Image (cartoon, grey):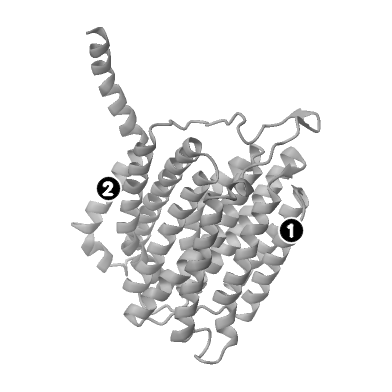
Amino acid sequence: MADDSHAHSDTPHRVRGIFREEFALWVGIASTLVLLTVGSPWLKHLDSPILFTLLFAWVFGIMLWLAFGVVRHADCLAIKLGEPYGTLILTLSVISIEVVMITAVMLTGGENPELARDTMFSVLMIVLNGMLGVTLLVGGWKHREQVYNLQGANTYLAVIIPLAGLGLVLPRLTDSEPGGVPSVLMEIFLAVVSIVLYAIFLTMQSGRHRNYFQQPALPKTVDGQKSHDAPGGHDDHGNLVIRSTAYHVIFLFLTMLPIVLLSKKMALLVDHGISALHAPQALGGFLVAILVLSPEGMGAIKSALANRLQRTVNIALGSALATIGLTIPAVLIVSLTTHKTVELGLEMPEILLLALSIGVAVVNFAGTRTNLLQGAIHLVLFFAYLLLIFD
């Protein structure tokens, strides 16, 4: 009886705890309901700069808050399931949001054939140069040198290189269609090849070669300081509240649902903002990429500071690979079924920057230790990408 009464009295406390933890979800649901009902007419009067600014800040802020919630549940699953499954769940969740947002803009926004290409290129530049640059820089500053699993990094890059070349460069070099638009035959080829290669990679990553993507054991001391033992060492979970696997899986999908429903509204706002401000079209892809990748980037930085660089590598290179392997087939399927024009081929300056980024990544991940200089080099390329958007 005492145990039953204690469990009964503890139930309201647990409910209140869950309500506080998932507060972003409740706000997201309320915001979604408002924008789908009484707030729907507001999106028809975007000529007012004040109304547009308020709506953009509201929707962008809510979606970003929800994205952090998705990452939190993915991090909890990573702790419960171990690597590489945890990072894989995180990557697939984040890239799913990216795919939904791109398709929403394609289906509801104005004619913008470059959006999918610009978003994929933005993701590649952010993760290969921005995310890797910052993490290698702060990790190198704190720990001087950091170790990771060379086989895992090389496996990522081995798949990224052909998919990036075939999907984002080859359409620019062929003349079957004008500009960087792939022909129908090439669209089918790229969709099939991307799905098949990514499926083979996932099979290998989650199966017989999962050890490629786990943090190698670190020496007892690094420069006289005690280091983390990995895998299987002590992990600081921070403020995360770990619950059951089913709980985190359910709430991960529930937290993604408002993001999916708000994507159409965000698409209208991004499309209007670029047109009204006469901003570069590539800025739309950059905004989508920043919205999607910000929470993931925070996780990568935390891992680097905790001297768990393999998780950073899994997040950054995994996001780059998933972007190409999943987004290209998704946008091409939309293109084939809706007859929307999709331009995949990058312009020549972007092709050069992509080649430099992948080349630097290959060189920097040729050894088993990273340092501060490598991060600085990646950041230089990231700033060159930002310059390219406006120049």
Looking at the rendered image, the quarter that the C terminus falls into is bottom right
The residue located at (76%, 60%) in the rendering is: 363
In the picture, measured across the screen, residue 53 lies left or right of residue 4, that is right
Q: How many marks?
A: 2
Badge 2 density bin: few <14, some 14–19, many ≥20, Cα 10 Å: some
Circle 1 is placed at which residue position? 377
Q: 104 or 216, which lies in front?
A: 216
Circle 2 is placed at which residue position? 29
Residue 233, placed above or below residue 358? above
The residue located at (55%, 82%) in the rendering is: 171
> Residue 254 has which mark?
none
The residue located at (55%, 52%) in the rendering is: 205
Q: Earlier in the sequence, mark 2 or mark 1?
A: 2
| Cα–Cα gap, marks 2 and 1 | 42 Å
Looking at the rendered image, the quarter that the N terminus falls into is top left
Kind of element beneath mark 1: helix
Q: 169 or 389, which lies in front?
A: 169
Q: Which percent across, then down, holds residue 295?
A: 49, 48
Residue 222 occupies quadrant: top right
**Three-letter amino acid code at disc 2?**
Ile
Kind of element beneath mark 2: helix
Q: Answer yes or no: is residue 386 visible.
A: no
